[in-house]
Amino acid sequence: MEKIKMTTPLVEMDGDEMTRILWKMIKDELLLPFIDLKTEYYDLGLEYRDETNDQVTIDSALAAKKYGVAVKCATITPNAARVEEYNLKEMYKSPNGTIRAILDGTVFRAPILVKGIEPTVKTWKKPITIARHAYGDVYKATDMKIPGAGKAELVYTAEDGTEVRELIHEFDGPGIIQGMHNLESSIGSFARSCFNFALETEQDLWFATKDTISKKYDHTFKDIFQEIFDAEYKEKFDAAGIEYFYTLIDDAVARVIRSEGGYIWACKNYDGDVMSDMVATAFGSLAMMTSVLVAPDGTTEYEAAHGTVQRHYYKHLKGEETSTNSVATIFAWSGALRKRGKLDGIQELVDFADKLEKATIDTIESGTMTKDLALITTLENVNAVNSEDFIKAIRVALEKELG
Ligand code: NAP
Ligand code: MG
């Protein structure tokens, strides 16, 4: 069989620990035999990040901007223990944070559904994708303990020195206050990323805040979304047969639980933090959760939502067998290949991505899976396999798919 040709390289961001091991297995077993894989390779493994003083992370993000599509392996975000373990020159920032800041992107997390791993919420039949605004609000807030009676105010001083003041509260005893902010530009980027991703995946977009109580703050989010939608996206949504709607967060929560899934739920920073954990847990497994970073200019980076699975890596280093789930990392590759195929008009690449996903799901549904899934599946006669045998089983299914 002739290998599928690519015209534009994918930006490949390699990573750390167990996921780095899986990364190579996936390429060797599931990609290289079938595709004339064209990538521009960036090694975001911690050793090389340290060697380049983290310049490689910046370079990889700029390359993603240049080519439009990237696929990323999970990476270590160093803490004190990692600085010692890897003898690092400094405690580098999270690569995901660095890349997100350069691309100005929004992260979309979606579960991969398979028969036998059932959502806790019985009505959910399709994935629910959570989009979390990743800037500001309580994550960049200043808070203060108020020791006793006194007046607290918000003060804005313009560049020309004029002041605007708003009373927060006249305290007659001790209390607490908090000041937080957001930027119209960041909210606008968030909105565009959400609209673009809805069009890309042909799903409805829901957005919810607490604008009835937060009449200026949350209401501004609501207004910016609506203005951008009306001016730039309404016609495209109509043409695609999808819908954007805004509702109060309380109403959204109730609707989500009663829904079948199959839409994108855009959330402010805090709501997204909390709701994504709830939705991910209710869908069954962190190892089955994908993560896509979408920039307002359309640049897209695909990865797994989970980390480097450190505990499994240490077992692997000791020569012990591991049973690490590679599904989300495989779907990062298929997502990136599909996107590249669509952008470059290479239908074979799009078809390959579909078949790779189907082969992966079929493998699990036929009973062959890693231990994490074997523990929670409702299927009977399960064949729990190690990391490598799982990928080999997918290859068998993939070869059948490809004919
Ligand atoms: P983790 O790698 O997500 O793993 C936490 C636990 O979840 C694992 O020990 C394992 O449980 C289970 N798990 C996660 N993914 C799995 C998979 N694919 N297959 C089977 N089990 C899986 O999180 P962590 O251990 O807290 O973090 C490890 C490193 O990852 C850290 O250095 C962190 O900085 C980094 N991290 C990176 C990203 C990213 O690059 N996007 C995201 C999160 C964390 P058992 O051990 O019980 O089997
Ligand atoms: Mg959280």
Image (cartoon, rainbow, N blue to C red):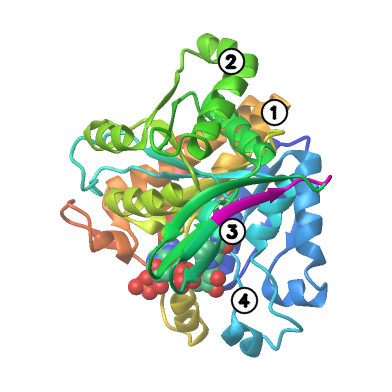
Q: Is residue 163 above or below residue 1?
A: below
Q: CA distance from mark 4 to mark 2?
A: 43 Å
Q: Is 45 above or below relative to 184? A: below
- Is residue 157 part of the magenta span, yes or no? yes
Q: Secondary structure at mark 2?
A: helix
What's the CA distance linking mark 3 and mark 4? Answer: 21 Å
Residue under the image location 36 percent in, 37 percent down? 249
Amino acid bearing label 2: Asp
At label 4, which amino acid type do we have? Answer: Pro
Q: Is mark 3 within 8 Å of ligand 2?
A: no
Q: CA distance from mark 2 to mark 1?
A: 26 Å
- Residue at (22, 59) in percent of width and height: 376
- Single out the mark in the foreground, 1 or 3: 3
| Closer to the eye: label 3 or 2 | 3
Q: CA distance from mark 3 to mark 2?
A: 30 Å
Q: Is residue 18 above or below residue 199?
A: below
Whether the residue under disc 4 has CB within 8 Å of ligand 1 = yes
Q: Are dots 3 and 2 in contact, CB under 8 Å?
A: no
Question: Which mark is on residue 78?
Answer: 4
Residue 231, image quadrant? top right
Residue at (33, 48) in percent of width and height: 279
- Of mark 3 and mark 2, the one earlier in the sequence is 3
Q: Amino acid at mark 3?
A: Lys
**Chain-order first, disc 1 or disc 4:** 4
Please say if 106 is above or below 212: below
Q: Left of 9 or right of it: where is 295? A: left
**Secondary structure category for the residue under label 1:** helix
Q: Name the element at disc 3.
A: helix
Report the residue marked by disc 3.
Answer: 140
Marks 3 and 4, the one that precedes in the sequence: 4
Q: Name the residue beneath numbered marker 2.
A: 230
